[in-house]
Amino acid sequence: MTSTLAKEGVSPLLVRARMVSDATVDSEQSYARFLKFKEFVGFDQKDAETLGRLGPVLVPEQARITDAFYEAILHEPETRAFVEGRIDTLKRTHSAWFGELFEGQYQRAYFDRRWRIGLAHVRIGLDSRWVDVVCTHIHELVLATLSDLLGSEGVVAHRSFARLLELDRAVIQLAYDEDRLSRLSEFTGMKRALIENVVRIAR
């Protein structure tokens, strides 16, 4: 199928998107994991309040941070292929994502929005390893901005932001994991629980 579509001039990204299973992934189980992750990293109400206070400081810097982010994405050939021709649309999406980081509410609705972002990355076929690299780059951009604007006072705020960004990264990775399990189950006919048990077996 892939070679046929490629010969017809269909974008490899569209080929990958068509091949991704439409099976429903288990967002309920992933949300339970998200709550466990929040507890593990120590993300609490104080962090939520800190991030809420950061909004007026960082949201005005969003356009500059977003521009710097996409400049880096365009510089790398592997990631550039995923964004060329739709930069303006992606920047608007990135702007919304960035603003939500500082709304101070990080329950189910927040998870659901991040889950959809994870699935969008899955569907376009972006290598999941780039998620870690991209999140690290955003982290560095925000850290530098906090240092410039708040100096030493930004240390506590940075801890809260770092915890939340790790949670965002975890949700996106959960979307990748769930998609892999769903497609493997669909392809092999094996039940998901059996596949998960096989994966857990120590070598």
Image: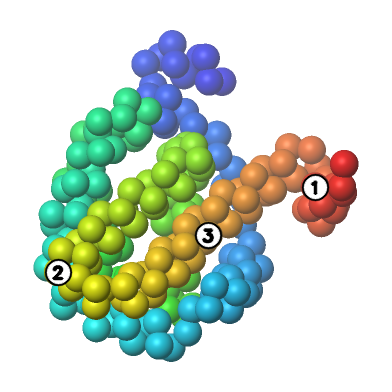
Sequence-earlier tag: 2 or 1: 2
Residue 59: which quarter of the image?
bottom left
* Amino acid at dot 2: Leu
Between marks 2 and 1 in the image, the one whose residue lies nearer the viewer: 2
* Quadrant the N terminus occupies: top right
**Residue 132 location (% of width, % of height):** 46, 48
The residue at which mark 3 appears reads as: 170
Q: Is residue 95 left or right of residue 171?
A: left
User: Callout 2: helix, strand or loop?
Assistant: helix
Return the residue nearer the eye: 70 or 192: 70
**Residue 99 seen in the figure:** yes
User: Callout 1: helix, strand or loop?
Assistant: helix
Q: Is residue 186 left or right of residue 172?
A: right
Badge 3 density bin: few <14, some 14–19, many ≥20, Cα 10 Å: many
Count numbered badges in the picture: 3
**Residue 159 location (% of width, % of height):** 39, 72
Label at residue 199: 1
Return the residue nearer the eye: 17 or 60: 60
Q: Is residue 150 left or right of residue 20?
A: left
Residue 100: which quarter of the image?
bottom left
